[in-house]
Image (cartoon, helix red, strand yellow):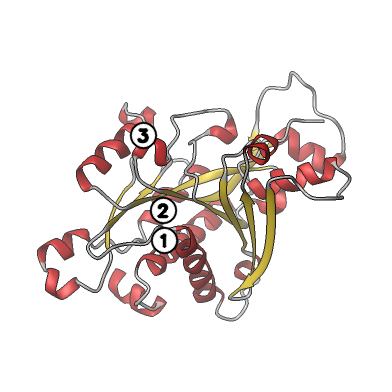
Amino acid sequence: MAAIKTDLTLEAAHALLEKKGGQGRLSGVTLDERQVEGYAVTAVSVRTPYGARALGKPRGMYITVDLAPYFQRQEGYFSRGVRCLAEELRHLLPPLADGASVLVAGLGNRSMICDAVGPMAVDHLLVTRHLIETLPSRFSTLTSVAALAPGVVGQTGMETLEVLAGTVRHVKPAAVVVIDALTASSRSHLCATVQLSDTGLVPGSGVGNHRSAIDRKTLGVPVIAVGLPTVMAEAVLAQELTGAQAQADTAPLFVTPRDVDSRVRELGRLLGYGINAALQPSLTVEEITGLLG
């Protein structure tokens, strides 16, 4: 059987349960399913070192939102999706004191569409730090938000962690939100789910291009990760479609949906708005649109 390559903790949990014949529970891991604004949400809590080792994921909370209502164009799909993401993000964010800032970073390569969701989400962020510092009395009801799209090491010569660590030292945010593309092990999840977690992330880990971890340990503040799966291993896809076992010496090859361009652009906007609504709870979706315009 081909090794499962996935950044989605929900997929890792389901794969482990399948190995157990679909019976029983995962020690140190709990799964909770609910509906939020008509969207199916599954929360996976990895609570113990044993559970973390079994899943190959750090201890923490992982929330997966199924975007089926969005692509079915159900009534109010965008606004409901924004409110769903905002509600789940608020569960993961630390309490923000008055005057606290949040740094949002859109990771990835804007020139490669399957890796561009982070920068595209940042394009739809309501950035307020400069406004609050300039006119605090007028914008005091808003949360201070700074944002950047640090690019990739091949473009900048700097590791993403180096760029973020320097920015964190200067801005001193209460939390960092990082947005990145992920790897899935099922085609049904490609550009069709969002994973939120309070564990940070390791850019490129799903495709074997491991970079430095971006988490609370390396940045010194809570790091909330927002991820969209855009690629999966070709060998895993072939196995899913045919049941045939992949060759062990097959060179890594990753595939993506043929409509990835339109999906990443749409979902980058959805993620940006969801983060806006989480950080600016007093604003409606319509008000966010007006301020961004």
Residue 90, quarter of the rendered image: bottom left
CA gap between label 2 and label 1 equals 8 Å
- Callout 1 environment at 10 Å: few (<14), some (14 to 19), or many (20+)? many
Residue plotted at (72% across, 35% down): 4
Q: How many marks?
A: 3
Mark closer to the chain start, 3 or 2: 2
- Callout 3–callout 2 Cβ contact below 8 Å: no
Q: Is residue 13 left or right of residue 207?
A: right
* Disc number lying in front (3 or 2): 3
Q: Secondary structure at mark 1?
A: helix
Relative to 293, is 119 above or below? above
Q: Secondary structure at mark 2?
A: helix
- Callout 3 environment at 10 Å: few (<14), some (14 to 19), or many (20+)? some
Which quadrant does the N terminus fall into? Answer: top right
- Give the amino acid type for the residue marked by disc 2 in the picture: Met
CA gap between label 3 and label 2 equals 20 Å
Give the percent coordinates (x, y) of residue 142: 26, 70
Residue tagged 2: 120
- Callout 2–callout 1 Cβ contact below 8 Å: yes
Residue tagged 3: 161
Q: Nearer the viewer, residue 211 or 22?
A: 22
Give the percent coordinates (x, y) of residue 257: 64, 49
Relative to 253, is 147 above or below? below
CA gap between label 1 and label 3 equals 21 Å
- Give the amino acid type for the residue marked by disc 3 in the picture: Leu
Residue tagged 1: 272
